[in-house]
Every structure is written in C-alpha cells, then in structure tokens.
Amino acid sequence: MSQAYDLSDDARLASALAGQAGQLLLSARTLTSLTGKPLGGLGDAVGQGFLSHSLSALRPHDAVLSEEAADDESRQGCSRVWVIDPLDGTREFSEGRDDWAVHVALCVDGHPTIGAVALPGLGLVLDTATPPPMPQAPDGLKILVSRSRPPEVASRAAEILGAELVPMGSAGAKVMGVVRGEAHAYVHAGGQYEWDSAAPVAVALAAGFHVSRLDGAPMVYNQKDTYLPDLVVCRPELRDRLLAAVS
C-alpha cells in the first residue's frame, strides 16, 4: 500500500529525525560508563530504536532499509524507501571523537531525493530542506579519505593532481566535510553499502556538488544487492580532472 506525502514535509522530517537521534546518541555516550565496542553497540541500538520507531509511526506506508535491521526484501517493490544509518562511524563514536554522523534519507524510485546528515559532535544538521550554499574552496587541493582504509585509487589521484590526502572518520562526516568546504573532494572504493552514502549524497547533490561512482555513473539506491562500494563527491569545477584521475 502506498500513500502520497509532501516532499517538503519529508525533508523537514528527515532533518528533525537526524538531529533528534544525534542528541540521543550524545546523551547516551555521556551517561554511560561503557567504552569501546560495547559503547558503539549501545549507540547503534539507541539510534536504530529511535529512527525505526519514528518512521514506523510517521511514515507507516513507506519501506525502510537500515544498517541495523534485517533487510525486508519487499522494499524492492516500493517507490519510497527510507535509507538510514542510525550511527555512521560507530568506531569514532566509541572513541569519543566528533567525526561520526546520523543519516536519514528518502529514496524515491532509486534516487536519493531527500536527505539529512547530523554531525552531533559539531552541533550541525545539514539537509536538503535548506541546502547549504557552495563554500569557498580551501587553500591547497585536499581529498578526504577513510581513516582506516584509504583506497589506492585516492592515493593515485592525489599524486596525479598534486593533492593532499586528509583522513577523516565516517562517510557522512567526509561528504559533509566537502560540502562544508574543508576539502575539495572525497574518494572512496570498497566496503560501503547504500546506508553509508544515501543521505550524504542527497545533501551533496542538493548543494550543487558532483556525486557519482568512480566511473562517473550515478548513485542508484534500493537495489536488491545493497553493496555500493565506490563514491566520488567533489566540487563541480574539479569533476573532469578527478574522474580522469580515478579512472
């Protein structure tokens, strides 16, 4: 069963839910004595519980795909699918760092139409309801990469372009780092799923940034196989040079 919803209401809802989940996670981290992996597990559970309950109550006719829940394959027949990551960057959260995020996206017919990324450690929510303006480019060409597994393709691109590789935590934090003007680009290859990128991609697209797979193909969601391993997000003026360097 489907029901029509107003996309502007969806955008406001995504932003509110991401922000509220982020505040709950900050409180949970402050109030518990847990550390390390147990703290990360608590964060995953808190974020998932809040977001799943909220979407079930507020968008009962929509499907949901989450990192922290079993995949209901009936979503593949749905036009509207919420793709969420209740805690993107569990490791960073458990280490007391700020470079973790909460992702809430709505994909319509596979397109990342609505998105909100909360960066609770920074007190920020970036969303498609009010897309951030394109910031001034930082000095010196910078490419954000994973802290734990920077891809070889990014190293090769940095060498070709004369760029500096800058490690950062969660995928959401890195994409928002580009959107916020901390770097020119984010390049990733391997080890991501739809929930890792849907909300950040929606925000980046709404803000006017280039987003694609490494081969330049668009990001498509609500696929049977949720593995979506590679991603390029960059300032539009860098698009052609960066895609050539990672090809």
Image: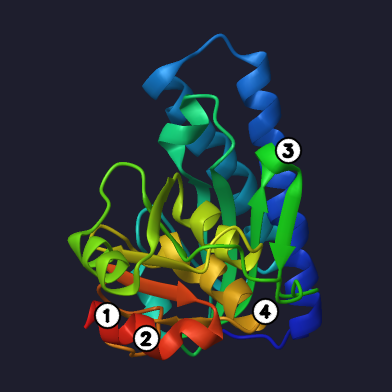
**Tag nearer the camera, 1 or 4:** 1
Q: Secondary structure at mark 1?
A: helix
Tally of marks: 4
Is the C-beta separation of discs 2 and 3 under 8 Å?
A: no
- Read off the residue under disc 4: 207
Q: Secondary structure at mark 4?
A: loop
Residue 123 in the image: x percent, y percent?
Answer: 76, 43
Q: Secondary structure at mark 3?
A: helix
217 versus 197 height, above or below: below
119 versus 61 height, above or below: above
**Mark number, residue 241:** 2
Residue at mark 2 to residue at mark 3: CA–CA distance: 39 Å
Sequence-earlier tag: 2 or 4: 4
Q: Amino acid at mark 4?
A: Ala
Q: Quadrant of the N terminus?
A: bottom right
Between residues 20 and 97, which one lies in front from this camera angle? 97
* Residue 148 in which image quadrant: top left
**Mark number, residue 245:** 1
Q: Secondary structure at mark 2?
A: helix
Q: Amino acid at mark 1?
A: Ala
Residue at mark 1 to residue at mark 4: CA–CA distance: 24 Å
218 versus 147 height, above or below: below
Sequence-earlier tag: 3 or 1: 3
